[in-house]
Image (cartoon, rainbow, N blue to C red):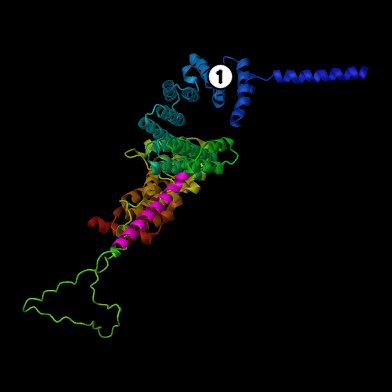
């Protein structure tokens, strides 16, 4: 008995220790657990942890912001707003304004949300926060039906942070509302090039936008256009497209029933059932539609009756004609006037070498066929095909141009300096070496962190894509020359770009800087660079001066004397 009591006491002590250890969790530990659960997308459990943390430390604004964010993800927007307003009453700058603004927007308070996003721009001016604030403002103005203002904010957000998801998706949605489908498709294509933790979710959202727009067209009576739009969503997400088509066919059936077109309505319902055979609601709707099937036979019956009538009329005409009296003998044909007598042959004489009924060639003059140009546009015109004023070239995977009139420094200043994003952007550039925004983002990071080798590795492939990227790559390297301490890895690329563009003076100044800062390590590269420049401009005295100084350094007396003679001749001229 004593042993049993002893065991019970031990178990009780252990149970008590477990309970006390759980109660002993600090508010900070609970907050950290809540953050981890948010990253794992276990939002309901995250709410529990944050609520416990707030109970233990009600005045901690960090814990309150975490709880408000968790409420946003569990769609408890009202609770989130209350929490954020507690923080706001204590310290305006410390509010998590992005989630506060989004909670207000989801609660139908667009104007209050606009004020919250403006506060985010006021108190937290990092590039990322500015991009988030502009995206939130774009959503607010879209909700208020101000598409122009909404578009401005989404574009501004994309400029502040080219890798922030959803901006191009939202721009595509605006373009759809303006019936600019091809431009919307281009924005969706750009969106899918941005690194994302859940690309499938992005595709599903694009498909849903297309389905919504297709249903809008169907509700406007544009059944074929709406159906085609929903069909097009299938290339992004087949499940969303299938559900959208079921919805579309059902709606089209309702419209056709109200128009008295029951047979067509039945066809739409049959298509919907084919996609979802187990849908009892569709089966019930189909059985309730009594078709007027006899209507489809009316054209055939009517055609048959008309044919009988026509046949009857023809028979009557023939019978009447047969009862007519024989025609009288025709009067004599007057003889031709004197002087105009003609011999009328009584037989048909066959032409030599031809038989009766054979076609005689060479007798009919044929018009020459119009000359058809091999030029594609003219060829289409000749063939009668519609020709657009310009044949569009295939769109590149990414086509984002740099801002007109903005200096490179201004452009780069807008981008983040976030080391965590570097790997994503590098992978993006490996797959899409001509991705302009990705290059701008990553080159900014490398310049700020004095990484000339890395900048050289991404700029080499980038500048050979096309003229647009070559121009931007040149500007980035020129900007880097002012910021990076060791210019050697990028100098070779920049020198070649100058040579390609016949910009001899710029190349000479670049090599002068290499000479001044890195002569000892770059002497051979300098010689090669200057030889290439001499091929472009043999009489450039600056190039010969540099050669002269290099030969002095390498102690090549013969070459030094030769360069001295050339310099003297050029000076004399």
The kind of secondary structure the magenta stretch mainly shows is helix
Q: Nearer the viewer, residue 319 or 171?
A: 319
Q: Quadrant of the C terminus?
A: bottom left
10 Å crowding of disc 1: few (<14), some (14-19), many (20+): many
Residue 19: give x, y in percent of width and height.
74, 19
Which residue bears the numbered disc 1? Answer: 64
Q: Quadrant of the N terminus?
A: top right
Residue 112: give x, y in percent of width and height.
43, 20
User: Does residue 488 appear in this view?
Assistant: no
* Magenta segment includes 298: yes
Along the horizontal axis of the image, is 280 left or right of 211?
A: right
Q: Nearer the viewer, residue 311 or 571?
A: 311
Q: Which residues are magenta?
A: 294-320
Residue 231: give x, y in percent of width and height.
48, 44
**Is 121 drawn above or below residue 503 in the view shown?**
above
Residue plotted at (60% across, 23% down): 47
Residue plotted at (90% across, 19% down): 4
Residue 229: give x, y in percent of width and height.
44, 42
Q: Given the current orientation, which residue lies at the most extreme left position? A: 338
**Is 556 drawn above or below residue 416 in the view shown?**
below
Q: Quadrant of residue 228?
A: top left
* Magenta segment includes 498: no
Residue plotted at (40% across, 46% down): 473
User: Does residue 291 appear in this view?
Assistant: yes
Q: What SS does tag 1 mark?
A: helix
**Is 5 drawn above or below residue 167 in the view shown?**
above
Q: Nearer the viewer, residue 453 or 395?
A: 395
Along the horizontal axis of the image, is 335 left or right of 321?
A: left
Q: Nearer the viewer, residue 33 or 41?
A: 41
**Looking at the image, how many numbered discs can be counted on the residues?**
1
Q: Given the current orientation, which residue lies at the most extreme bottom position? A: 352
């Amino acid at each position: 008995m004593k042993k049993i009591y002893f065991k019970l006491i031990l178990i009780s002590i252990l149970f008590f220790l477990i309970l006390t250890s759980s109660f002993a969790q600090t508010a900070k530990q609970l907050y950290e657990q809540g953050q981890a659960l948010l990253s794992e997308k276990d939002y309901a459990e995250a709410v529990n942890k944050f609520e416990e943390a707030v109970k233990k430390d009600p005045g901690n604004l960090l814990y309150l912001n975490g709880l408000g964010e968790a409420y946003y993800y569990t769609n408890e927007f009202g609770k989130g707003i209350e929490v954020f307003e507690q923080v706001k009453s204590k310290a305006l700058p410390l509010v998590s304004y992005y989630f506060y603004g989004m909670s207000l927007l989801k609660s139908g308070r667009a104007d209050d949300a606009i004020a919250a996003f403006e506060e985010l721009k006021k108190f937290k001016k990092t590039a990322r926060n500015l991009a988030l604030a502009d995206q939130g403002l774009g959503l607010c103005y879209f909700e208020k039906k101000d598409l122009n203002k909404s578009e401005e904010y989404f574009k501004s957000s994309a400029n502040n942070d080219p890798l922030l998801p959803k901006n191009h998706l939202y721009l595509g949605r605006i373009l759809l509302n303006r019936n600019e489908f091809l431009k919307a498709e281009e924005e969706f294509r750009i969106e899918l090039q941005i690194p994302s933790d859940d690309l499938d979710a992005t595709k599903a959202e694009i498909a849903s936008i297309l389905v919504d727009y297709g249903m809008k067209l169907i509700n406007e009576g544009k059944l074929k256009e709406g159906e085609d739009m929903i069909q097009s969503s299938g290339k992004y997400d087949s499940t969303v497209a299938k559900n959208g088509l079921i919805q579309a066919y059902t709606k089209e059936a309702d419209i056709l029933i109200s128009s008295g077109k029951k047979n067509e309505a039945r066809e739409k319902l049959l298509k919907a059932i084919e996609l979802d055979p187990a849908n009892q609601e569709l089966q019930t709707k189909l059985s309730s539609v009594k078709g007027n099937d006899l209507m489809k036979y009316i054209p055939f019956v009517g055609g048959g009756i008309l044919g009988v009538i026509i046949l009857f009329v023809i028979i009557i005409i023939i019978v009447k004609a047969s009862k007519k009296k024989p025609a009288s003998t025709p009067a004599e044909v007057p003889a031709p006037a004197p002087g105009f007598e003609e011999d009328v042959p009584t037989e048909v004489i066959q032409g030599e070498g031809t038989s009766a009924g054979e076609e005689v060639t060479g007798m009919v003059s044929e018009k020459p066929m119009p000359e058809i140009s091999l030029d594609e546009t003219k060829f289409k015109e000749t063939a009668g095909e519609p020709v657009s004023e310009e044949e569009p070239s295939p769109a590149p995977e990414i086509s984002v141009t740099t801002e007109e009139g903005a200096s490179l420094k201004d452009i780069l200043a807008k981008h983040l300096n976030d080391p965590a994003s570097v790997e994503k952007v590098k992978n993006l550039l490996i797959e899409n070496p001509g991705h302009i925004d990705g290059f701008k983002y990553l080159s900014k990071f490398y310049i700020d962190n004095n990484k000339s080798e890395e900048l050289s590795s991404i700029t080499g492939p980038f500048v050979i894509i096309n003229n647009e990227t070559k121009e931007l790559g040149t500007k980035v390297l020129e900007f880097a020359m002012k910021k990076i301490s060791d210019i050697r890895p990028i100098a070779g690329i920049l020198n070649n770009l100058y040579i390609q563009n016949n910009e001899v003076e710029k190349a000479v100044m670049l090599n002068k800087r290499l000479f001044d800062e890195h002569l000892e390590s770059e002497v051979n590269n300098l010689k090669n660079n200057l030889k290439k420049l001499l091929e472009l401009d043999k009489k450039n005295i600056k190039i010969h001066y540099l050669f002269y100084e290099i030969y002095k350094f390498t102690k090549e007396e013969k070459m030094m004397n030769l360069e001295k003679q050339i310099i003297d001749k050029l000076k004399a001229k």
